[in-house]
Image: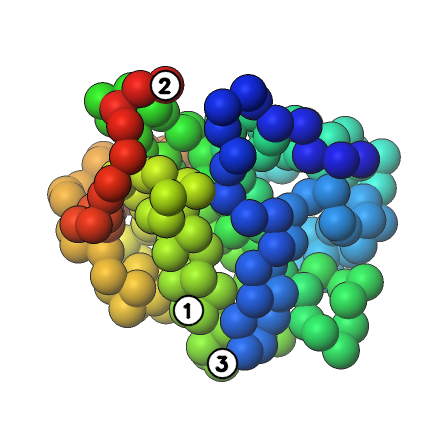
């Protein structure tokens, strides 16, 4: 499926690269590979992510989500990248998602990310996230601000978000339902000091 585009908006690149992984838009991955990514990391993600609906880790559900993600990317309402290692291009090992994209005077988005448990602590996500943020802050992405919400006890993610230049905004009590209860989150933001663009939609 080709990425449709909104007239007048070319949008971010659908392929980015770091020394460790390639970041690709949803149109370049298979639903079975995404389903496998979620299945093999289900225990790893469950502590930090909201509960998933039944069948979430099936190829059928992921095929629908990939189609929706491709459409959103082209329309400029959300940008999801999947992380692929060059030596295993059919295997998904991570995800970076810029959602809640708001244009006009805001030019902002929220970012969420995950990486395969076997790649934690190796600098893979730090490099990928820095690459993706640079694209969002480019003339193609045109974002002025990116926000992240992280559990206070998620030390690894807190260290990562600071490593890629985010500053703390404050605590959001009972922010998301995760692992059976409403969990506090710390809000972080990074601003694009070199923003050049238009506040138009």
Q: CA distance from mark 2 to mark 3?
A: 38 Å
Residue 32 spot, x, y in % from top left: 84, 49
Quadrant hosting residue 141: top left
Q: Residues within 10 Å of mark 1 (few under 14, many from 20)?
A: some
* Observer-nearest of 137 and 60: 137
Residue 146 spot, x, y in % from top left: 31, 43
Residue 81 vertical placement versus 181 (above, below): below
Q: Residues within 10 Å of mark 3 (few under 14, many from 20)?
A: few
What residue do we see at 25% from left, 40% from top?
A: 196
Q: CA distance from mark 2 to mark 1?
A: 30 Å
Residue 123 spot, x, y in % from top left: 45, 77
Residue 144 spot, x, y in % from top left: 26, 39
What residue do we see at 80% from left, 35% from top?
A: 1
What residue do we see at 14% from left, 43% from top?
A: 170
Residue 131 vertical placement versus 54 (above, below): below
Q: Earlier in the sequence, mark 2 or mark 1?
A: 1
Residue under label 1, please give it. 126
């Amino acid at each position: 499926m080709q990425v449709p585009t909104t007239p007048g908006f070319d949008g971010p690149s659908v392929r980015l690269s770091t020394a460790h992984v390639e970041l690709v838009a949803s149109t370049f991955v298979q639903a079975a590979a995404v389903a496998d990514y979620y299945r093999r990391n289900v225990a790893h993600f469950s502590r930090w992510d909201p509960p998933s609906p039944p069948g979430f880790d099936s190829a059928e559900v992921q095929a629908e989500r990939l189609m929706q993600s491709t459409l959103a990317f082209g329309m400029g309402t959300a940008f999801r990248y999947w992380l692929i290692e060059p030596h295993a291009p059919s295997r998904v090992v991570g995800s970076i998602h810029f959602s809640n994209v708001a244009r006009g005077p805001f030019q902002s988005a929220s970012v969420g990310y995950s990486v395969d448990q076997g790649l934690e602590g190796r600098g893979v996500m730090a490099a990928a996230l820095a690459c993706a943020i640079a694209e969002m802050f480019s003339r193609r992405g045109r974002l002025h601000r990116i926000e992240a919400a992280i559990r206070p006890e998620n030390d690894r993610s807190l260290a990562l978000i600071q490593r890629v230049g985010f500053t703390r905004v404050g605590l959001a009590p009972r922010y998301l339902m995760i692992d059976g209860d409403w969990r506090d989150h710390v809000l972080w933001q990074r601003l694009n000091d070199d923003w050049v663009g238009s506040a138009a939609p």
